[in-house]
Image (cartoon, helix red, strand yellow):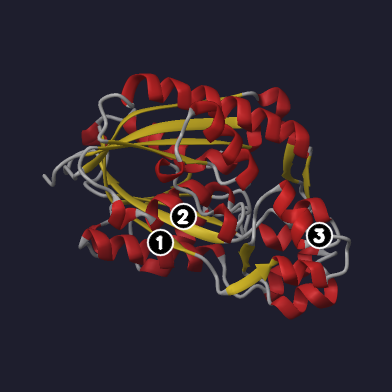
Amino acid sequence: MLYLHAMGHFHPENVLSNKFLEDLDIGTTNDWIMERVGIQNRRTVLPLDYIRRTKNVNPREAFAVRQYTNARMSAKAARMALERAGLKSEDIGLVISGSSSPDNITPAEASAVAAELGIEAACFDLNSACSTFGTQVNFLRRMQPEMLPPYVLLVGAESTTKVINYTDRNSLVLFGDGASAAIVSTQIPARAAFVDSGFDARPSGWTKVGVTGDWVFSQDGNAVQGFAIRTTTDCLKTLQEQYEAEAKRFIFIAHQANYMMLKTVCERRGIKPESHWYNVDQFGNVGCCGAPATLSMNWEKIQSGDNIALVIVGAGLAWAYAMLKVEDKR
């Protein structure tokens, strides 16, 4: 059992609205975007004037002008989680980070996050791109409780907009930036706990989506979306069959790829609007942070008797799922 004590999230202030993207004059409109992906807004670490002026055609220049590093965003999300849990930085005994868009190759980004928070503890990165949070949960659930410190901080940050070419209308409409954080424990009980999880991958499709060594993003959109819909639907079906009937509320949270993908999965599995938590319409696809940030944004709404199914599918091609049960406070 892996207890979840608190969640946190952060999104930068700069808004990439559909109107802003229309004004870039690269052939996209609000109607075109909403019909295809259902996203209204996204957030970016980049200055809006920089995007207008350069369209980020040379992504390497973005590193110099970004207004937040991944470590700063992760630390902001972590501070929210610490406050919610009633803990301090010194209570954390291990920091695990992950990102589809890291700021540096070495050392582990977890070290930069820990330093930002003043944490002197073990740090390492565990990354599987979009499915990172689910993979981190799976990893910790499989460890012996006595091998871990009382509290572990899981963080993820994405600044994908710094590798997006804003002349490519198919990519620019999707992505936003942000961070998420979770404080978990294998030893100290909490009212929420991950009671089931799994992960897998189809490595033969690893070239379908990613960021190359020259910091250029590319994606076979149709192939990735089809894979994400099928895999998410299958994983959700498995969790519904085991956990839906017993729940007071069965909540579904998926990888925040795009709203139209989420809508298709919900229609196939009979998930009602009130049982589907998402934020992609206002924050875009924030990679590994999308699903956990959605959970964080609904943290005050979770109730005893909730069974919350997380299914996260993305680059790799990798996927992870987890069942979070909420009970009376322990």
Q: Residue at point 50% right, 27% down?
A: 269
Marks 3 and 1, how far apart in space?
31 Å
* Residue 16 image position (x, y, % from top left): 67, 68
**Dot 1 amino acid type:** Ala
Dot label at residue 110: 2
Disc 2 secondary structure class: helix
> Mark 3: which amino acid?
Asn
Q: Which residue lies at the image location 76% right of the left edge and 49% below the top edge?
A: 213
Is 84 on the left or on the right of 95, as rendered?
left
Q: Which residue occupies 32% across, 60% down?
A: 81
Question: Circles 2 and 1: CB distance less than 8 Å?
Answer: yes
Rounded to the nearest whole Å, what is the CA distance between mark 3 and mark 2?
A: 27 Å
- Observer-nearest of 118 and 279: 279
Residue drawn at x 83%, y 70% as measured from the top left: 24
Q: Say which quarter of the image contains residue 102.
A: bottom right
Front tag of 3 and 1: 3
For the residues labelled 2 and 1, the Cα–Cα distance comes to 6 Å
* In this view, 302 is above or below 63: above
**Which of 82/127 is in front?**
82
Residue 271 is left or right of residue 223, and the answer is left
Q: Which residue bears the numbered disc 3?
A: 165
Furthest residue in direction bottom, as rendered: 49
Disc 2 crowd rating (10 Å Cα; few below 14, some 14-19, many 20+) is many
Q: On screen, 230 above or below 133?
A: above
Element type where label 1 sits in the image:
helix
Label 3 crowding class (10 Å Cα cut-off): few <14, some 14-19, many 20+?
many
Q: Name the residue under label 1.
A: 114
Q: Which of marks 3 and 1 is nearer the N terminus?
A: 1
